[in-house]
């Protein structure tokens, strides 16, 4: 690794960027440099010697059994019931919080499938990618909407949502000990968080991102991967499989059922 690359990595580490975020940023910079080289701009001969690698991340998700427990949990406070329904919706639709928290009743339309059955679809444009999406609504989501005369739950801020769904999962009894990382404290003077790795009760590791990961993990093997990547927004199957924590060995073992 070159000196400048090492200094950049050290800077990111000191400012508490995750290892995979650092690796991704270095790869972006290399891509820009290669594009510059292609267009005749002189670049360092050491560019190709800069190597990065992704680290395996914790794949924390809610199983279908845990989703059923959450669905049947009794919450005395309305704001927790509201957050719980958003959490369930996120796990059944696989979208980022910046997208699903904007959902509205009038974004839903019905179309007939090949069987001639009317099925609900929701149309929206993803905030992060600007991609126009049409995604089917599962019967479980429809059941949640029917509780509110077809309306989605009340919109809440990302900060409150993250805090409330932890409380929802704690009350529901998701207290088994698992390995993972959680945001432990705010660095004074800025919005960077230190992440503490260790053993925690599962509810402590729940955040807004868990819905998208739960959708991907629970449906892998049941829905064609090409359909899942369309919904989650992963550009390649390899990225998707890494996202849900599937190793080459895991894939090979699953393939054995076909031989």
Image (tube, rainbow, N blue to C red):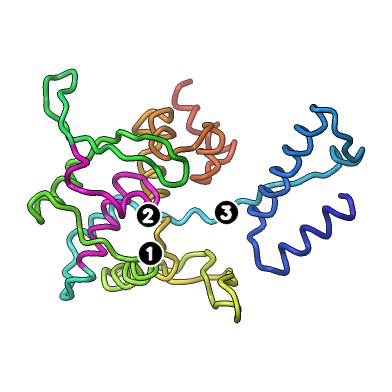
Q: Please indicate whether residue 238 sits to the left or right of residue 228 in the image.
A: right
Mark number, residue 158: 1
Q: Which residues are magenta?
A: 81-108
Residue shown at 17%/71% (left/top)? 78
Tag nearer the camera, 1 or 3: 1
Q: Earlier in the sequence, mark 3 or mark 2?
A: 3
Element on which disc 2 rests: helix
Circles 1 and 2, Cβ within 8 Å, touching? The answer is yes
Label 3 crowd (10 A; few <14 / some 14-19 / many >=20): some
Element on which disc 1 rests: helix
Q: Earlier in the sequence, mark 1 or mark 3?
A: 3
174 vs 45: above or below: below
Mark number, residue 97: 2
Quarter of the view holding residue 194: bottom right
Outermost residue on the left side: it is 149
Q: Position of residue 104 (x, y in %)?
A: 22, 49
Q: Position of residue 25 (x, y in %)?
A: 68, 49
> How many angstroms separate mark 3 from mark 2 (CA)?
20 Å
Q: Please indicate whether residue 162 sits to the left or right of residue 84 in the image.
A: right
In-front residue for pair 15/38:
38
> How many angstroms separate mark 1 from mark 3 (CA)?
22 Å
Q: Main secondary structure of the magenta part?
A: helix
Q: Please indicate whether residue 86 sits to the left or right of residue 40 in the image.
A: left
On whether residue 168 falls in the magenta region, the answer is no
Residue marked by disc 3: 57
């Amino acid at each position: 690794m070159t000196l400048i690359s090492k200094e950049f990595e050290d800077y990111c580490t000191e400012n508490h960027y995750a290892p995979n975020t650092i690796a991704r940023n270095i790869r972006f910079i290399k891509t820009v440099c290669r594009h510059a080289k292609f267009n005749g701009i002189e670049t360092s001969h050491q560019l190709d010697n800069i190597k990065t690698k992704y680290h395996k991340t914790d794949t924390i998700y809610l199983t279908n059994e845990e989703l059923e427990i959450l669905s049947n949990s009794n919450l005395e406070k309305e704001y927790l019931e509201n957050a719980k329904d958003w959490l369930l919706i996120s796990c059944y639709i696989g979208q980022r919080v910046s997208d699903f928290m904007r959902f509205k009743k009038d974004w839903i339309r019905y179309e007939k499938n090949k069987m001639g059955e009317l099925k609900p679809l929701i149309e929206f444009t993803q905030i992060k990618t600007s991609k126009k999406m049409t995604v089917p609504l599962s019967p479980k989501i429809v059941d949640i909407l029917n509780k509110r005369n077809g309306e989605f739950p009340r919109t809440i801020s990302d900060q409150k949502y993250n805090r409330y769904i932890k409380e929802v999962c704690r009350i529901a009894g998701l207290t088994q000990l698992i390995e993972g990382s959680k945001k432990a404290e705010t660095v004074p003077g800025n919005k960077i968080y230190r992440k503490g790795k260790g053993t925690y009760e599962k509810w402590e590791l729940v955040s807004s991102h868990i819905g998208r990961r739960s959708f991907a993990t629970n449906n892998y093997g049941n829905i064609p991967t090409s359909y899942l990547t369309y919904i989650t927004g992963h550009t390649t199957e390899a990225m998707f499989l890494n996202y849900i924590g599937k190793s080459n060995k895991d894939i090979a073992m699953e393939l054995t059922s076909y031989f």
